[in-house]
Image (cartoon, rainbow, N blue to C red):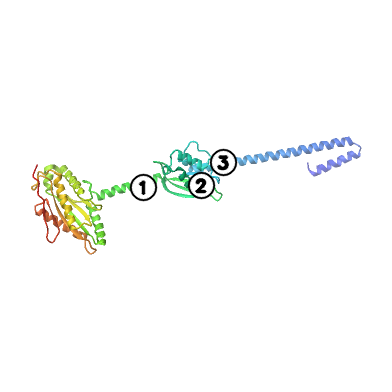
């Protein structure tokens, strides 16, 4: 009720009272108070209804904000989980729900991180923690403040992932786990392809040992290393005797198998790490022996000759033996910066030539006074 109306009613009441209508005046005042009370009640109810409407509008805004937050974190191509300052789970997206410790059916909003991880530990989902679960958990919880874990696999045969965790100024913890499986698998595939390509480029495709290219690379490397150490480097050049006659008699498939057998036998004659058996070309092989002097190189060559005879590989077309034999040239040089590794190859090939000219099935060494070492042939069986 506004002030002018109230004043007017008061003046009217006063006039009635002066006129002697006391009872009427009191009745009028009572009705006036009731009217005033009803007016205040109506105003209060109107205010309450307005406030309730505002609260409902705020609730709607909160629900809309929660929906948008859910849509946003579900759209992130990484696992996302958010914890409050009491380490209780507030939200997580669909991506992280596929990963431990969130992948369990019982995962609910409000659970602590420790509860979730303990469930994963009991299920054996964390291989690194098996057998030391409590220690692992204590270390994990202690470092749960600002973490960027290295690339890791969270479960056996599971996804490769990077784990990021950071605290907000209000103490909330935001975790993101990025699944890098496609990138890792692609990188591994490229690495395997590179290794395969490297093997193809350095391995003889027919007999499976080092090829000429690998021999040249290894010779250069070992020459430089021996030059630094002022040590000797020995080389054996091995040639299959009368290999063309072998091919003519046994065919090319038989010849290919013969090359593989010789490669296997020569491989058994080298003992130390770093020694290389390579196919130098055709039916010719090279044995590179770092830090081996001439006397030891000669002993290795002698062993190769005897192992070939002991293998008893038939060679019906050979003029020197019923069994497959080889000729070997041996050379040794003390590597030095002013010398070339090609010198070692030339001397070994020259020694091999003398061995073949001297009747084959023998070895020759690159020495100012060459010493031939013919090998007696066993009687045919």
Marks 1 and 3: which is nearer the front?
Answer: 1
Tell which of 268 and 54 is nearer to you: 268
Q: Residue furthest bottom?
A: 338
Q: Is residue 98 visible?
A: no
- The answer to whether residue 29 is above or below residue 216 is above
What x and y, as percent, mark residue 42?
73, 38
Q: Is residue 301 visible?
A: yes
- The answer to whether residue 370 is above or below residue 84 is below
Q: Which residue is mark 2?
A: 174
Query: Which image quadrant: the C terminus?
Result: top left
Residue 223, which numbered label?
none
Give the number of marks.
3
Mark 1 or mark 3, which has the lower sequence index?
A: 3
Cα–Cα span, label 1 and label 3: 42 Å
What x and y, as percent, mark residue 211?
22, 51
Determine the secondary structure under disc 1.
Answer: helix
Mark 1 in CB contact with mark 3 (< 8 angstroms): no
Crowdedness near tag 3: few (<14), some (14–19) or many (≥20) residues, C-alpha within 10 Å: few
Q: Which residue is mark 3?
A: 64
């Amino acid at each position: 009720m506004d002030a002018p109306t109230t004043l007017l009613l008061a003046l009217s009441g006063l006039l009635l009272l002066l006129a002697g209508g006391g009872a009427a005046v009191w009745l009028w005042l009572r009705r006036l108070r009731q009217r005033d009370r009803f007016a205040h009640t109506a105003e209060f109810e109107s205010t309450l209804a307005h406030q309730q409407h505002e609260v409902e509008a705020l609730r709607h805004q909160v629900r809309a904000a929660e929906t948008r937050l859910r849509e946003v974190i579900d759209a992130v191509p990484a696992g996302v989980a958010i914890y409050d300052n009491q380490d209780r789970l507030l939200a997580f997206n669909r991506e992280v729900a596929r990963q431990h410790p969130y992948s369990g059916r019982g995962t609910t909003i409000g659970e602590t991180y420790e509860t979730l991880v303990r469930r994963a530990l009991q299920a054996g989902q964390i291989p690194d923690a098996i057998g030391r679960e409590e220690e692992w958990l204590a270390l994990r919880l202690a470092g749960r403040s600002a973490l960027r874990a290295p690339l890791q696999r969270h479960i056996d045969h599971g996804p490769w992932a990077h784990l990021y965790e950071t605290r907000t100024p209000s103490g909330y913890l935001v975790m993101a786990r990025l699944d890098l499986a496609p990138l890792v698998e692609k990188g591994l595939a490229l690495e395997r392809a590179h290794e395969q390509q490297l093997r193809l480029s350095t391995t003889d495709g027919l007999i499976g040992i080092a090829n000429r290219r690998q021999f040249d690379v290894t010779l250069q490397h070992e020459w430089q290393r021996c030059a630094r150490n002022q040590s000797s480097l020995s080389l054996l050049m091995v040639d299959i005797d009368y290999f063309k006659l072998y091919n003519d008699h046994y065919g090319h498939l038989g010849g290919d198998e013969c090359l593989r057998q010789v490669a296997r036998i020569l491989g058994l004659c080298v003992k130390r790490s770093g020694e290389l058996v390579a196919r130098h070309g055709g039916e010719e092989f090279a044995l590179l022996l770092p830090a081996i002097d001439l006397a030891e190189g000669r002993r290795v060559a002698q062993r190769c000759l005897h192992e070939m005879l002991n293998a008893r590989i038939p060679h019906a077309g050979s003029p020197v033996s019923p069994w497959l034999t080889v000729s070997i040239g041996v050379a040794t040089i003390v590597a030095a910066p002013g010398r070339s590794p090609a010198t070692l190859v030339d001397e070994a090939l020259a020694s091999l030539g003398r061995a073949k000219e001297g009747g084959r099935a023998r070895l020759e060494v690159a020495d100012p006074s060459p010493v031939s070492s013919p090998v007696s042939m066993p009687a045919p069986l």
